[in-house]
């Protein structure tokens, strides 16, 4: 099976844990692994003095937890909508009773007008800016450090969805001026789905938490997690798989992991350019490459799937996305493109 999707190929040592008996969670041993995982993740995120809230939930749930706990009804907030996941921030923000929400829409695959955003932030009107580091639907990577500097100067808190960019692109909460980072287990972390994370900077921890629900409540979750115990019943094996994955990353080094993903992305895009296939994102993340097939994705992708090769279609009829995470190799990517070419020829020949 060849996986150019989320999650990608998972480390064999991590996968093996999923087949082991499930241990009891309320033990000192489990608490120790949870505490160590939090410390390691905060270190990798470069979040000095911060805390990590973890949930047995999706990344979308972690996004909603941020809004439920940190955005007060009187706040004015700004959100960047550059694709499916930027739209998700907007839809969630509109579902809570806020005084004012301003949305900056960005054409699909394009960079935002950073000068305009900087001017808007500089006015000091916004308590929060919400955006993606990598808009996974198009492949574009936004300039978070630039916007982080503008937010810091204006006193605006910056919340970033880094679910697919973490461990694919360079990332630092301290250096980029990020106050809140959302992660999930199955994209950049390359684990099975089911865990959502919110990393809170020192400044975010100083903010008053809203009391809107029980499951996502930051205050109660942080109290319990301080002892190493998730507040509610955790997905035990996922937490153990997380610990093993982080251990592997620490042995390799974050820089080496990012460099491996970057190398696969660069080489795949070089192969696309040689075939005159443009990349959709103007400023792409290392995480994935989005491009157009020469036939409809619905005609080609099912054949790949039947052969055990998985890529991601998108909202546009011909668009597909190929992820560069996990255990895939440059040769795997080369063979994928060879097979795509073969199927395109077969499909276009059948119609001739």
Image (cartoon, grey):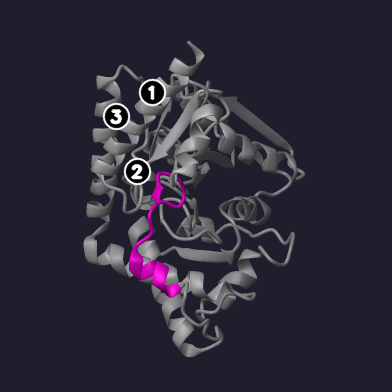
Q: Residues within 10 Å of mark 1 (few under 14, many from 20)?
A: some
Q: Residue at x 43, y 74 (%)?
A: 17
Q: Which residue is mark 2?
A: 324
Q: Position of residue 327 (x, y in %)?
A: 31, 54
Q: CA distance from mark 3 to mark 1?
A: 12 Å
For the question of whether residue 280 can be seen, the reply is no
Query: What residue sits right under mark 1 in the picture?
Result: 282
Q: Earlier in the sequence, mark 2 or mark 3?
A: 3
Against 254, residue 126 (above or below) is above
Mark 3 lies on residue: 269
Residue at (39, 63) in percent of width and height: 41
Secondary element at tag 2? loop
Q: Residues within 10 Å of mark 3 (few under 14, many from 20)?
A: some
Residue 225 in view in this figure: yes
| Whole-percent x, y for residue 23 in the image | 52, 85
Residue 261, disc: none
Q: Nearer the viewer, residue 304 or 147?
A: 304
| Foreground pick, 16 / 302 | 302
Say if 64 sits above or below 149 in the image: below
């Amino acid at each position: 099976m060849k996986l150019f999707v989320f999650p990608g190929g998972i480390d064999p040592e991590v996968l093996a844990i999923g087949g082991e008996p499930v241990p009891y969670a309320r033990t000192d041993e489990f608490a120790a692994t949870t505490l160590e995982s939090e410390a390691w993740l905060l270190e990798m995120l470069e979040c000095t003095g911060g805390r990590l809230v973890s949930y047995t939930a999706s990344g979308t749930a972690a996004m909603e937890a941020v809004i439920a706990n940190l955005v007060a009804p009187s706040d004015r907030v700004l959100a960047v909508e550059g694709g499916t996941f930027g739209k998700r921030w907007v839809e969630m923000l509109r579902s809570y009773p806020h005084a004012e929400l301003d949305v900056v829409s960005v054409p699909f695959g394009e960079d935002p007008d950073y000068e305009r955003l900087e001017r808007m932030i500089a006015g000091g009107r916004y308590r929060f800016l919400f955006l993606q580091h990598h808009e996974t639907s198009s492949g574009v990577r936004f300039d978070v450090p630039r916007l982080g500097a503008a937010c810091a100067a204006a006193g605006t808190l910056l919340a970033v969805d880094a679910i697919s960019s973490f461990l694919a692109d360079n990332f630092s909460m301290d250096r980029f001026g990020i106050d809140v980072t959302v992660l999930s287990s199955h994209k950049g972390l390359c684990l099975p789905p089911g865990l959502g994370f919110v990393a809170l900077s020192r400044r975010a921890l100083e903010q008053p938490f809203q009391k809107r629900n029980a499951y996502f409540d930051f205050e109660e979750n942080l109290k319990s997690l301080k002892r190493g115990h998730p507040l509610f019943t955790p997905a035990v094996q996922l937490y153990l798989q997380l610990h093993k994955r982080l251990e592997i990353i620490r042995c390799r080094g974050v820089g080496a992991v990012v460099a491996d993903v970057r190398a696969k992305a660069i080489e795949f895009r070089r192969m696309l350019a040689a075939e005159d296939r443009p990349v959709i994102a103007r400023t792409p993340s290392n995480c994935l490459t989005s491009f157009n097939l020469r036939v409809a994705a619905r005609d080609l992708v099912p054949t790949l799937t039947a052969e055990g090769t998985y890529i991601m279609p998108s909202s546009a009829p011909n668009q597909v996305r190929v992820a560069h995470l996990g255990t895939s190799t440059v040769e795997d990517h080369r063979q994928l493109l060879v097979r795509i070419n073969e199927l395109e020829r077969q499909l276009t020949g059948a119609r001739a």
